[in-house]
Amino acid sequence: MIYIILATITSVLMLVIVRLFEIYNAHTFYGLIFNYISAFLTGLIYSYFYFQNQYLDFFQAILSNSWNVWILTAVEGVLFISVFYWIAMTIKHYGMAVASVANKMSLIFPVISAYWLFNEYLNAYRWVGLVIAILSVYLTTYSSKKFSFSKTSYTLFPLLVFIGSGIIDSLINYGNKTFIDTIPEQLLFSTFVYLFALFTGFLLLKLDKNKFLQQQNFSWKHTMMLGFILGIPNFYNLVFIIKALNTHVLPSGQIFLILNLSNVISSSIIGYLIFKEKINKMNWLGILLAISSILLIQH
């Protein structure tokens, strides 16, 4: 369970740092670019010293890495930053509540995919826990603010957030269970996925003709500083998730479910305690249901 706890802690750190972007007037997308530079460099240093300690040739391992590992790494890198872009578009047209629900509801993907692809057993407790988890996400992110899907030309974005976020977790699980099954391969994946995300970020900036990703009157200093700080827990979060999957303390689908619910609970409580964000009665009920779901899933 230690890696599940560490993955949750690094996720909370990431949420706090992202929240600081707004407070310190940092450019969100540029900060994300610096974050991927930092995550990639952190991964390079961490991986290089690991290979050195194991008397392995780091550069030879990069060159000899199998093509299917590189394909998955590239796909995940593209999805990492693309989902962020879709979340930004969803927030712009429908608000934070819709984006949060679309993103967090994706927790059903790794559970269902693990059930169908790897025959992971779901007893009655876990099925009930999954249903309660979905309800808890809705209640935790519930807002009395009204929104409308009348802008039909933009309804694709919440759907892309939902599907994209789910695919990211499902592919990590699939790769870990099939062909990314050694520590060197896992480290190379955890490192170079951020390089592909970085390249995709530069491409999105190039294609941003409507200047949606641009931001006025931002602080370059805070953008760079927070972006580089964010990259460190970002890299280790992925490392801890993969390590948690390899402990086999629970079926992989349930591990992703617990991680997502932990993030839902942590983000709500951190927002309330540190950033003085309001939590209504529905949100508190959602947090209690999320905790109940985690307890049920472990049966």
Image (cartoon, rainbow, N blue to C red):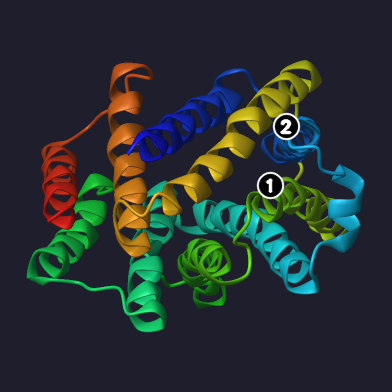
SS state under label 2: helix
User: Is residue 144 shown above or below 277?
Assistant: below
Lower sequence index among marks 1 and 2: 2
Is there any visible trace of residue 186 in the rendered image? yes
Q: Amino acid at mark 2?
A: Tyr
Looking at the rendering, which quadrant does residue 229 occupy? Answer: top right
Is residue 139 found left or right of 74 in the rendered image? left
Q: Nearest the camera: 174 or 20?
A: 174
Looking at the rendering, which quadrant does residue 56 occupy? Answer: top right
Is there any visible trace of residue 26 in the rendered image? no
Q: Nearest the camera: 187 or 259?
A: 187
SS state under label 1: helix
Q: Quadrant of the C terminus?
A: bottom left
- Residue located at (39% from left, 70% from top): 109
On residue 46, which mark appears?
2
Q: Residues within 10 Å of mark 1 (few under 14, many from 20)?
A: many
Q: Nearest the camera: 190 or 289?
A: 190
Is mark 1 in CB contact (under 8 Å) with mark 2?
Answer: yes
Q: Which residue is mark 1?
A: 187
- Residue located at (72% from left, 34% from top): 50
Is residue 194 found left or right of 230 in the rendered image? right
- Residue located at (28% from left, 28% from top): 269
Q: Quadrant of the N terminus?
A: top left
How far apart marks 1 and 2 lie (CA) works out to 9 Å
- Residue located at (43% from left, 53% from top): 245
**Image spot of residue 146 (x, y percent):** 30, 55
Q: Residues within 10 Å of mark 2 (few under 14, many from 20)?
A: some
User: Is residue 95 shown above or below 13?
Assistant: below
